[in-house]
Image (spheres, rainbow, N blue to C red):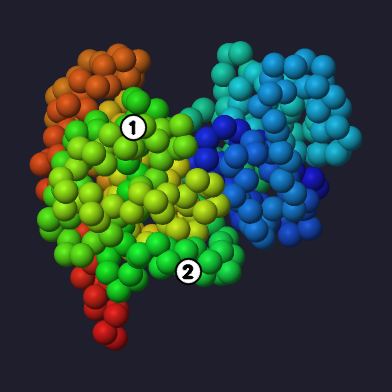
Amino acid sequence: MKILVIQQKMIGDVLTSSILFEALRKKYPEAELHYLIQPHTRPVVQNNPYINKLVIYDPALNKNPVKFLFFGKQIRKEGYTHVIDIYSKISTGIISLFTGASCRLGYHKKYTSYFYTKTFTPVNEPATSAGLAIEDRMQFLQGLQKDFPKHSRPKIYLDNLQKQKAAVKLKAGGISFEKPLIMCGVLGSSKNKSYPSSYMAALLDKVVAQVENCQILFNYSPCQEKDALEIYNLCNPVTRSRIFLKLYALELQDFIANCATCDLFMGNEGGAANIAKALKIPSFSIHSPSVKKNYWGIYEDGDRNVSVHLKDFRKEAFKGLSTKEITKNAAGFYELLEPNLIFAKLNPFLQKVILKKSEEKYL
């Protein structure tokens, strides 16, 4: 048995889909398991003991038919018996077909169903605390055998040496591990998934006022530096003195290592929040108004993993509107999600996490 799992594009998606490998390995210990991903997502699945091989897909192949065809021929030579295409777009559907695998699983879509031998429809309501993003992916395994578990937790297998090196760098940059250290996802993956700059700055001001001696690291994509600096400059002077901008992790693997040293994550829901959860770091996430909270609210327990969505406070604002309409007016919906609303839920989370850190320190 030789299985190829396909998940392209976003970091959070690649990390979340990696849950399939532990389940597959436990069920089929002798199987060869490969994971097709894009190069920038490699760090979140590096060292995963359940994956035999990472197949790196250059997105530039989508614009070069000749090279794409050559890639398809190389994939066919692998002799896969099963393909699980979580991405299920036309390009990955073609790759699935190229493999020649007798079992090809994908999402049910009018324009891609032809590529697969069996398709699945996304789950509407979660049956467990795992969330729809987890349950949607795990249902694919039912196409192989019926007794797979319904959920599993994403994990990042960070090398201890990486974490130690990160701690040394952070300490040299002025971080004290005797004080609370917060990783802040100040921006989402796009404008429509980013809490407004002025609101994020106001939220950070409140955090610094409540959490004594806290230290804050920023996380954002390199192309978002200008927007991140805008948030920094909107903060009050005391808050700015607690933000360590120079310790920004340019590479994903460095962010993962830095995050592993932090006491908690707070900020926009997205890949960074998923990484924190996979590292077992307490997380507080702000969902985009256009995203369903029960989809990416992975393993939320109201304790270590907490999140907020405008629907928690203003459910009536969404009545009769489609996701497309909400996305189009994301800025208007974000305006309704004022910092005071979020902080009413964030502050108890902060106090609980920081209090627990203090108690553990003196045990």
Mark 1–mark 2 Cα distance, whole angstroms, equals 28 Å
The image position of residue 67, as x and y in percent, is 80, 22
Image position of 360 (left or right of 221):
left
Who's the residue at 42% across and 49% down the image?
248
Instruction: Say which residue label 2 marks.
Output: 168
Who's the residue at 45% across and 37% down the image?
221
The image position of residue 308, as x and y in percent, is 24, 42
Instruction: Say which residue label 1 marks.
Output: 227
Image position of 193 (left or right of 31):
left
Visible in this render: residue 155?
no
Q: In which quarter of the image is the C terminus?
A: bottom left
**Circle on res. 81:** none
Asked if 325 appears above or below 208 in the picture, the reply is above
Amino acid type at circle 2 is: Val
Label 2 residue SS: helix
**Within 10 Å of the Cα at label 1, are there few (<14), some (14-19), or many (20+) other Cα atoms?**
some
